[in-house]
Image (cartoon, rainbow, N blue to C red):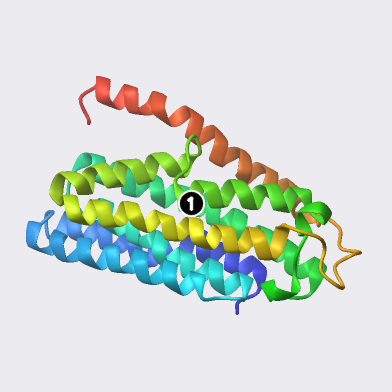
Amino acid sequence: SAPSPVSVVLAGVVIKVSGAYAAMRVFRDVFLNDAALGNVMLVLGLGSIVVGALGALGQRDYKRMLAFSSVSQIGYILMGAATGSAIGFLGAVLHFFNHATFKSLLFTGAAAILHKTGTRDMDRMGGLAQKMPVTGTGSVIALLSMAGVPPLSGFWSKLLVIIAVWRVSVPLAAMALLASALTMGYFMVIQQKVFFGQPAEGMEDVTEDRSLAFVQVLLSALNVIVGVAFPFLLIYLNGIGLL
């Protein structure tokens, strides 16, 4: 319900700094990666992934769906940090960054759509990819990155988190991996209701919001560039013995 610029800041920065980052630092620096607490955090993280994704699937309000998906994605950050390993912490930090970029991109797109259509009800939208190609392309890039599709940046952070969790608990890692299918589920809901097909009634005159187009292009490029460049960073970190 926040104004669109505030939603971008909340989703991109605030929820992680005030919640996920604090939990990561307390677990590592206060509890010294305690295994028992780590197991609790792993279960809570998995619960967050599943409940957030199911909540997103049940929404028709575009911004509410994106907000529920943030609940789900924070679960991956929590699970990576809860392993107490270097690779898990790296995955959590990278997903911290990735979530800031792809979720900011999605909320910027939602702001553009709200500004041009006057509604957040996805059942009243449709065919907007034809009318708003920059927003439509940005949505695809952000959602595929969030779902962990290579070579986008979200793939690497999810891969590192899953590997780290796999070393601690194979069942939890398998469930976290399968939960990515739920992300693809609400990805398809957004694309089908908002961007695919013919323009819905009342959407014939919608045009691209040029004031937000540059931001969407920049954030889209970040998701692609980080995804392509990150393997070279992994090789470097492995070479100096940090992984």
Task: Identify which residue, 38 or 9, lies in the foreground.
Answer: 38
- Image quadrant for the N terminus? bottom right
**In this rendering, would 111 be left or right of 222?**
right
Classify residue 119 by image quadrant. Answer: bottom right
Task: Identify which residue, 126 or 153, lies in the foreground.
Answer: 126
Give SS at disc 1: helix
Label 1 crowding class (10 Å Cα cut-off): few <14, some 14-19, many 20+? many
- Image quadrant for the C terminus? top left
Query: From this viewpoint, is residue 117 visible?
Result: yes
Q: Residue at x 69, y 47 (%)?
A: 137
The image position of residue 65, as x and y in percent, is 55, 70
What residue is disc 1 on? 146
Task: Identify which residue, 207 or 19, lies in the foreground.
Answer: 207
Q: Residue at x 32, y 44 (%)?
A: 91
The image position of residue 68, as x and y in percent, is 48, 70
Q: Which residue type carries mark 1?
A: Met
Classify residue 181 by image quadrant. Answer: bottom left
